Image: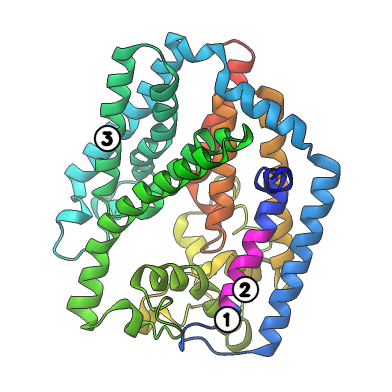
Amino acid sequence: MESIKKLIFNPFLSFSLYILLVFFLYVLRLSDLYVFNLRFSKFLSLVVLFSLVCSFVFSKFFYNFKNFVENYYFSLKSNKIEKLNTHIIAFSIFFIGFVGSIWQYSLIGATIFQENKIDRPSLYATGLPHYLGYLRVFLSYYIPLGYFLLRKTANNKFKFLHFGMILLSVILLGLDLNRGDYLFPLIAIIFIEAFYDFLNSNYLYAIFKFILIISVFLFIFNFFGYLRTKVVMEKHYKTDIVNFYKIRGPKVIKNSTFAWVYIYATSPLENFRDMLYNQEVRQHTYGLLLLYPFAQIIFKLNASNLKVFSEQLVPYLNKNYGLSVSSFMKDAYIDFGIIGIFVYIFAYYLLIFIGLKIYINTKNIYSLLGFCMVYNILLWSVFVNSFAIGTFLIGMFIFWFLSILENKNYI
């Protein structure tokens, strides 16, 4: 079990194994939509090898399991949990998200109430900057912090308040029918609950908690996601997920939930395969897409400028099957060509390194949540260039900033 603990709590190795898992699932070709290409399979093998080498090097020189675990325990047992400031910060994050949600839904409505539940309403239609929609996602930042305070505080009034606000946050986020908003809270709550018992060798209790947490979140995912899937499949395509995406294999594989997860995780690679061998980049962007949020500010570019660059390559499965993402590889290829895939992977490992350094040096719940956001960015990399998702970066920087302030006793 000790080796399993070291595996789970090694973010460098976890990321490389995550890449390996997704690539392996893709190579299985459990959908007839996918075209077999030996050259592409060899290329993916090279990418996996590079990732494993990076994980080994970073783990060897920049990771200490004992230090990581000591900081983890310290983060969850800090006596600052009962400070009023901690609750005020949590309430403030919730308030921003609550006001942002109500304001956004009052302007453009909520997806769940739209007749067309496929295309989400956009703030662009109001003439307001799209990043004002980021305020709603503060609810996603609040949920794990509120949950942590709910579990750890001895004040029953605060427990009641946090419970109500967590429930309200889940509902308000769900109105947009975006399951992605729940992934960060899922990762953070697993860290707070299940991993704590696992480290303390309460394996059965840890497994029970892990299954319970996953089950609750899968229920939320399926409840809100089904409303969109039902519209897409029944009203537009007159079929189900398994047949539409041509899933093949044993009966256990031909399960709508598995089919959805499989297609969602692996179709970005199929889209990129087509881009790599059948499409052409007219103009490389040399890091502008990798550093998208910062490039906008430094070079005074707007979203439409960078969108033109990104749309040089088109996901071919989008037209007939609505599969529109191409993993981080698309932007990496546009930025630097084939070498860009390896540049981006190395950048992800640098992000882990930075997050780990801040976590080790500050030792509080905010740094733990900031590190969970790093995990969130890594998980999203299989779908998109997650460096370019502003809400992730904002959340990560907020938690890092709060962790530094608390570490210096400013809050």
Query: Relative to residue 35, is residue 113 drawn left or right?
Result: left
On whether residue 21 falls in the magenta region, the answer is yes
Residue 328 position in % (x across, y down): 59, 64
Dot 1: few (<14), some (14–19), or many (≥20) neighbours within 10 Å? Answer: few
Work out whether 193 lies above or below 23: above
Label 3 neighbour load within 10 Å: few <14, some 14-19, many 20+: few
Q: Nearer the viewer, mark 1 or mark 3?
A: 1
In the rendered structure, are the residues bearing label 2 and label 3 in contact, judged by CB atoms less than 8 Å apart? no
Of the two numbered discs 1 and 3 on the same chain, state the one appearing first in sequence. Answer: 1
State the residue at coordinates (39%, 16%). Answer: 88
Instruction: Quote the CA–CA distance across marks 2 and 3.
Output: 37 Å
Q: Residue shown at 45%/61% (left/top)?
A: 304
Real-space CA distance between mark 1 and mark 2, rounded to the nearest whole angstrom: 6 Å
- Amino acid at dot 3: Leu
* Residue hosting label 3: 167
Q: Which residues are magenta?
A: 17-26
Residue that badge 2 annotates: 24
| Amino acid type for the residue under numbered disc 1 | Leu
Residue at 51% in and 33% down: 192
Dots 1 and 3: beta carbons under 8 Å? no
Amino acid type of disc 2?
Phe
* CB-based contact (under 8 Å), mark 1 and mark 2: yes
